[in-house]
Image (cartoon, rainbow, N blue to C red):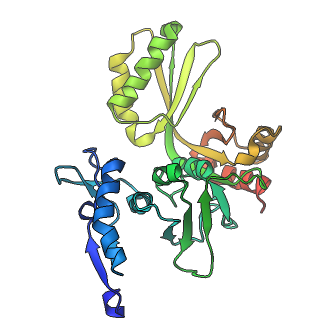
Amino acid sequence: ALLTEGIKAEYFTGGQAGIITDDSFGQANPLMPLCKERLKSTLLPLIDKGVVPVVTGFIGQTVDGIETTLGRGGSDYTATIIGAALEFDEVWVWKDVEGIMTADPKIVPNAKPIPKISYDEATELAYFGAKVLHPLALKPLIEKRIPLRVRSFFNLENPGTIVHCDSSNERIVKAVSMIPKVAIITVSGAGLYEAPLIIAKVFNALFDVGANAIMVSQSSSQTNISIVVGGDKLNDILKRLKALLPENCDVTWEGDVCVIAVVGSGMRGRPGVAAKVFNAVAERGVNVRMIAQGASELNISLVVKQDDAVKAVQAIHNAFIGA
């Protein structure tokens, strides 16, 4: 398309351009020092000559030249790896939405684009289910403090969302996101009196099957620990826990639940935010199964039944952002 418009261009796969990764096939990690060296040597001479490099997203290669992939949303990651390596002033990614939204428009029809959001807030949203960005896409840019702009290819007049290093607290909650189809696993029993050892075994089980703990909660009496995991890994985790844990530990699980994340730097040091969240869902008859908040006060996460997900997200969005 560029050539037919008289624009000089040259095509590369990610690996040919210089995106070098480890051998974690399907979820490869870029080796940034090598990426920086090779991307500069491949792409900068072309740019200096007025040639537009066109690089395939999602794909890299190992140092031995074996093709790898960066995982879901890897095209975003490709763009930010290149932007960081070449030290651009700003990186743009183009989407079918107006920018990063205050909620999934399929769940909240009145969701709004967010004009400005911090790296930390955007990373939280990506991790907790907002599909507009790859969860790791911001990582290459943060060290260089390079802004990322998310724009819509359907509306070229809209400036989209700028993601940068500064937090803006004009709104307490920036967005509400959701991870569907997760499960709660609870380990309890007499074995929990050796809590550090048991907790280590629980996380070893997750590591062994390549799973992440989305949320973790331990009772103050140390008689049980609950973790939230992706439903696709549930059976593998249960089998591994059975193999690793002593017989005096009981393992139970609950499916058909989801995680809802309420994200915003404006929550820091502000009393009453959690109460407002719980009041909003309670008014819609939604029971909260599990809660978590990190010391950063950037995110309040709660687990509810999957059947209650839509009305819970809508209730929280309406309470903080508006109907």
> Where's residue 25, x and y in %?
26, 47
The outermost residue toward the right is 271
Query: Which residue occupies 79% across, 53% down?
Result: 319
Question: Which quadrant would residue 318 be assigned to in this image?
Answer: bottom right
Question: Which quadrant would residue 157 be assigned to in this image?
Answer: bottom right
Q: Is residue 179 above or below residue 5?
A: above
Residue 252 visible in rendering? yes
Number of numbered markers: 0
- Report whether 44 appears left or right of 183: left
Query: Which residue occupies 66% across, 66% down?
Result: 113
Q: Is residue 216 above or below residue 195?
A: below
Query: Which residue occupies 63% across, 62% down?
Result: 101
Question: Which sits in the foreground, 208 or 188?
Answer: 208
Look at the image and tell me in which quarter the N terminus lies.
bottom left
> Where's residue 290, x and y in %?
63, 33
Q: Is residue 12 above or below residue 242?
A: below
Query: Which residue occupies 50% across, 68% down?
Result: 92
Residue 1 visible in rendering? no
Q: Is residue 50 above or below residue 62?
A: below
> Where's residue 64, x and y in %?
16, 50
- Report whether 91 appears left or right of 172: left
> Where's residue 99, x and y in %?
59, 67
Look at the image and tell me in which quarter the C terminus lies.
bottom right
Question: Which sits in the foreground, 8 or 202?
Answer: 8
Question: Which sits in the foreground, 317 or 68?
Answer: 68
- Report whether 309 appears left or right of 54: right
